Image (cartoon, rainbow, N blue to C red):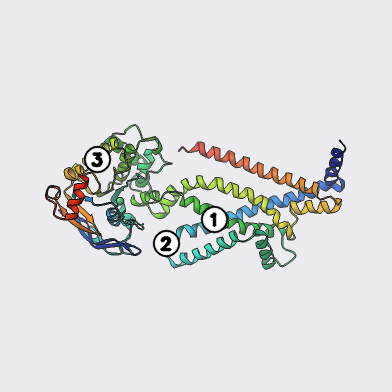
Amino acid sequence: MSTLIETRNLKKAFGDHVVLNGISQHIEKGEKVVIIGPSGSGKSTFLRCLNLLEEPTSGDVIFEGKKINAPKVNIDAIRQRMGMVFQQFNLFPMKTVRQNITLAPVKLKKMTQDEADVKAEELLKRIGLPDKADAYPGELSGGQQQRIAIARALAMNPDMMLFDEPTSALDPEMVGEVLAIMKELAEDGMTMAVVTHEMGFAREVGSRVLFIDQGIVAEENTPDEFFGDPQNPRLKDFLSKVL
Amino acid sequence: MNWLSTVGEAFYNAWVPEKRYLAYLSGLRMTLLISFFAVLIGILIGVLIAVVRVSSRHSKSPVIKVLNQVARLYVTVIRGTPMIVQILIIYNLIFTSPSTNPVIVGAVCCGINSGAYVAEIIRAGIESIPIGQMEAGRSLGLSYHTTMSTIILPQAIRNILPALGNEFISLIKETSVISIIAVNDLTKMAGYVGSRTWDVIPPYVIAALFYLAMTLGLSKALGTVEKRMAKGQRK
Ligand SMILES: Nc1ncnc2c1ncn2[C@@H]1O[C@H](COP(=O)(O)OP(=O)(O)O)[C@@H](O)[C@H]1O
Ligand SMILES: [Mg+2]
């Protein structure tokens, strides 16, 4: 396996508030890294540093061997290869589902509108919403919206997907349908970094689990070891609360 | 019923003799011209200022930072001082030649004032769109400008247009302030008629009716446009 994305001594502060205090991580192609940790510990910030929605204060973010938090890098081109799914879905409310999915590939000239429409149809079938192409996001349930947000990111044929608590804003009965799509995606070999509180998903799908706490990765391991034999006392404490 | 005929006579005097209605119409024409060009100038300035203000939040360019400070100063000064004082300063500062076209004088004075309000309306409209929309666009690899123009602005416009309509309605009314400088707008002409008839109330009431007709007319027109836009796009 080869490394897709890597951070080297990544630090991020907001003003005086140091959120990430030196994180060095490799994510290999095809790996599914699950990130857990207390609220406010910097999980989102770490994920958002990977596609530079947040600019690191210091340290490097390296994508396919190339440092991307550097002045001359075309970050838009890198982001086209890294899809992101947000807690709040962030679908475009004035556009139909089809337009949401096809907008980026067409605007970025990766596909013609016709090709993108075909792709959208395929994706909608895959996420189980083939009849929603002409609906507007506001007409859909949270679970449906999040599945479409996943489809929108997949339309760019990314090499990697970032998920930031994709099920946290959902009513409990809709969590399963979103996790099922993510699981399928994982089985198809997608490289994934997932921030979640769904420990079942972490255990089942994760190839590696990270515990972010107090600005660092305080523990990392395979799911079996991570959940079966946690070492860090704060992780033990955290797990005893969430499991 | 005696007072009715007295009032009737007063209005008759303020309207008919010496073809006084022509005075109102020329004043009306002036007010409309000034309002029209003031709106254009206001939009031009407002859009420029709003672009600077909004892009300064994302840009690290020192030029933008400086321009942003200038824009902020402009908005603060215009919104924090009375329009009548602004007009007196602008008029005496730049329009010192007596041959200056009064339409230009009025439009520039009112446009400079309106630009600050237009800028704030546009900025507030853009900033009311959740940050997640920009992040979603950028995370797909779209540039800042593409995201702004295809995702943010179409949503912001729906907040901006109604507020902009209100701004233009109040602009029409506020152009009356320029009657204090040498511009023969509707208010000034009403005062002129009053000075001839020795009875100022009827001409000002007539002027008020003209203003009311303009603002109601514009408000109705904007309402129709809004309704049509709402129909064109759902949610
Ligand atoms: N844009 C920001 N400005 C200031 N502080 C921020 C910003 N984003 C996040 N933070 C702070 O950074 C810390 C970590 O936030 P976050 O990464 O969202 O945590 P998590 O996702 O683990 O809950 C929090 O204390 C949060 O308040
Ligand atoms: Mg978070």
Determine which of the numbered discs, if any, sits on residue A179 in the image: 3
Identify the element where label 3 is drawn. Answer: helix
Q: Residues within 10 Å of mark 1 (few under 14, many from 20)?
A: many
Query: Label 2: chain?
Result: B
- Asked if the beta carbon under badge 3 is closer than 8 A to the nearest atom of ligand 2, the reply is no
> Which residue bears the numbered disc 2?
B59
- Give how far across and how far down residue B112 sits, in percent: 61, 59
What kind of residue is marked 2? Ser
Q: Residues within 10 Å of mark 3 (few under 14, many from 20)?
A: some
Quarter of the image with the C terminus of chain A is top left
Residue displayed at 21% across by 40% down = A184
In depth, the one of B148 and A138 nearer the eye is: A138
What kind of residue is marked 1? Ala
View quadrant of ligand 1? bottom left
What kind of residue is marked 3? Leu
> Which residue bears the numbered disc 1?
B119
